[in-house]
Structure formats: C-alpha cells, structure tokens
Image (spheres, rainbow, N blue to C red):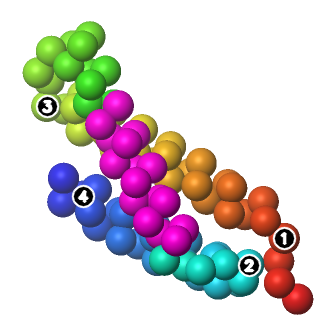
C-alpha cells in the first residue's frame, strides 16, 4: 500500500506538470488519476479474490498493475488535448 501511495504521488506530480502545459487545471487531472488508480486497484483485488483466493502477492501485483493502467488512461486523455500556445 505504501508503494502505491509513493508511486501515485510522483505520477500525479508529473501529470500536474503536463496539465499546466496544456492549459488545464492540474488538480482536476490529479483527482481523476487518483480515482482511476483506486478503481483499478479495487477491480484488481476483486479479480484476485474471485479467482485466486487470498494471495497477498497477487493482490499487490494486480492492484498496482490495474491501478497503473487507470493512471495511464487518464494520462493518455490529457496528452491527447492540444497544447496551449
């Protein structure tokens, strides 16, 4: 869990810089990334419980993996916006 928080801190910091360069509100995109990460994390953990039972390593792996996928989806949406001149 601590690794997720540390990774999320640095990833949202980077996302805020991208949002500023696009002329967007950084906090909006940071919150979307955090929510996408948490939703991906919960989906990953539910899948592990459903198919593998209580396996701590797989819980961590799927949780962080799908959380990162959620972050990448938000980042891709942000990067597809046009730059501000």
Q: Eyeballing the image, is 56 above or below 82?
A: above
Does label 2 or label 3 sit earlier along the sequence? 2
Residue 26 falls within the magenta-colored stretch: no
Residue at (29%, 67%) from the top-left corner? 6
Position of 54 with respect to 43 (left or right) is left
Q: Considering depth in this image, is 37 or 10 the residue closer to the camera?
A: 37
What x and y, as percent, mark residue 17?
Answer: 59, 81
Does label 2 or label 1 sit earlier along the sequence? 2
**Which segment is the magenta one?**
28-43
Tell me, for residue 3, which label it has, or none. Answer: 4
Residue that numbered label 2 is attached to: 22
Position of 59 with respect to 32 (left or right) is left
Q: Are marks 2 and 3 in contact (CB under 8 Å)?
A: no
Residue that numbered label 3 is attached to: 56
Q: Are marks 2 and 1 in contact (CB under 8 Å)?
A: yes
- Mark nearest the camera among 3 and 1 is 1
Secondary structure of the residue carrying tag 3 is: helix
Position of 46 with respect to 34 (left or right) is left
**Mark 4, other Cα within 10 Å: few <14 / some 14–19 / many ≥20:** few
Which corner quadrant of the image does residue 65 belong to? Answer: top left
Residue at (58%, 55%) from the top-left corner? 74
**Mark pair 2, 1: CA separation:** 7 Å
Which corner quadrant of the image does residue 63 belong to? Answer: top left
Assign the magenta stretch its main secondary structure: helix
Residue 34 falls within the magenta-colored stretch: yes
Residue that numbered label 1 is attached to: 82
């Amino acid at each position: 869990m601590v690794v997720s928080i540390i990774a999320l801190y640095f990833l949202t910091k980077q996302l805020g810089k991208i949002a500023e360069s696009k002329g967007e509100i950084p906090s909006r995109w940071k919150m979307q990334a955090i929510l996408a990460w948490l939703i991906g994390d919960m989906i990953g953990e539910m899948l592990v419980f459903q198919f593998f039972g209580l396996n701590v390593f797989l819980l961590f792996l799927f949780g962080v993996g799908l959380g990162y996928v959620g972050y990448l989806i938000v980042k891709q949406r942000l990067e597809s916006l046009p730059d501000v001149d």
